[in-house]
Image (cartoon, grey):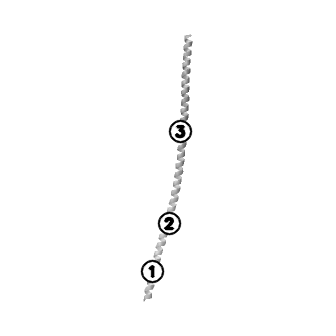
Amino acid sequence: MQVKKAAESAAAELRQSLQKEHDRAEALTGELARAQRGIETQVALSSKAGQEAAQVKKAAESVTAELRQSLQKEHDRAEALTSELAKAKRDIETQLALSSKAGEEAAQ
């Protein structure tokens, strides 16, 4: 009878230990699921941030290329205007020289 009682007591303790381990496993499973969701959220946010950064970089590169192109056009325009100004100065100097020569000839 004592052996049976001891066996029943041991079985009850084992069931109680088993229940505790089961509860602990359930709690750990819940914590693991929350951690996995947290990681997935962080990965999604990181991916989104990476995509946004790539878009910003692409936009910046596009704007930079447009600005370089505009700068080159303005440089070319300034070069052309400088050349035209130099030609106009030469033309004016030639006209002044011819006018001065014509004035001298007329005076003689």
Rendered position, 81 above or below 5: below
Identify the image quadrant of residue 20.
top right
Q: Label 3: which residue?
A: 39
Name the residue: 48% across, 67% down. Answer: 78
Badge 3 or badge 1: first in the primary sequence: 3
Name the residue: 54% across, 22% down. Answer: 17
Rendered position, 27 above or below 61: above
Asked whether 98 or 63 is in front, the reply is 63
Name the residue: 54% across, 41% down. Answer: 43
What's the CA distance linking mark 3 and mark 1? Answer: 83 Å
Q: Label 2: which residue?
A: 76
Q: Label 1: which residue?
A: 96
- What is the total number of numbered labels drawn onto the structure image? 3
Crowd tier of the residue under label 2, counting other residues whose Cα lies within 10 Å: few below 14, some 14–19, many 20 or above: few
Crowd tier of the residue under label 1, counting other residues whose Cα lies within 10 Å: few below 14, some 14–19, many 20 or above: few
Instruction: Residue 45: give x, y in percent of width and height.
Output: 53, 43
What's the CA distance linking mark 3 and mark 2? Answer: 55 Å
**Quadrant of image for the C terminus:** bottom left
Marks 3,2: beta carbons within 8 A: no
Amino acid of disc 2: Asp
Foreground: disc 1 or disc 2: 1
Asked whether 74 or 87 is in front, the reply is 74
